[in-house]
Amino acid sequence: MRTLKFNVRGQTLEKDPKCDYGNIVAGSKGYLLFEFNFSEELNGYRKVACFIDGPDIEYVPIINERCIVPDNVTDSRKISFFLTFVANDQKFATNKLSIKQEVIVQ
């Protein structure tokens, strides 16, 4: 399993500069794990990763600061996602990020 790391401060989602995002091959199933480092202000919120699949969004709960990338979004040239936070009557989202993938023609 390959882990990609991200930092989250409020509504800002960023790639962890110490993590290698190169050579990710499209089509991998059950292989990519996203790990998040959240700022303290986000404690107490339920956290959901929202993966963009064309016109649809696949919602994946973040448990213990991690989530597995759903198989249906791993076939394209990029994985695009954002995060949503919910607590009581509050709900807000981060910016969107995209991870490039290499497409291998067989």
Image (cartoon, rainbow, N blue to C red):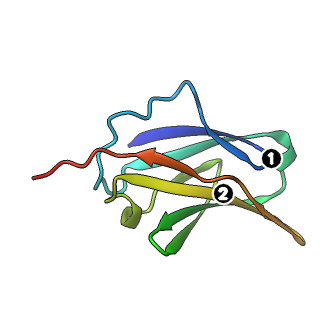
For label 2, the residue is 83
**What is the CA distance from the residue labelled 1 to the residue labelled 2?**
11 Å
Q: Is residue 11 left or right of residue 28?
A: right
The quarter of the picture where residue 18 lies is top right
Amino acid tagged 2: Leu
Crowding at mark 1 (Cα within 10 Å: few <14, some 14-19, many 20+): some
Q: Which residue lies most toward the right here?
A: 89
Residue drawn 41% across the image and 48% down it: 32
- Residue 93: % across, % down: 73, 59
In the rendered view, tell whether residue 37 sits above or below residue 48: above
The image's mark for residue 10 is 1
Q: Name the secondary structure under disc 1.
A: loop
- Residue 105: % across, % down: 14, 51
Residue drawn 44% across the image and 70% down it: 54
Crowding at mark 2 (Cα within 10 Å: few <14, some 14-19, many 20+): many
- Residue 91: % across, % down: 81, 67
In the rendered view, tell whether residue 51 sits above or below residue 38: below
The quarter of the picture where residue 57 lies is bottom right
- Residue 51: % across, % down: 52, 62
Amino acid tagged 1: Gly
Residue drawn 80% across the image and 46% down it: 10
Q: Which of the two discs, 1 and 2, labels the residue nearer the N terminus?
A: 1
In the rendered view, tell whether residue 25 sits above or below residue 27: above
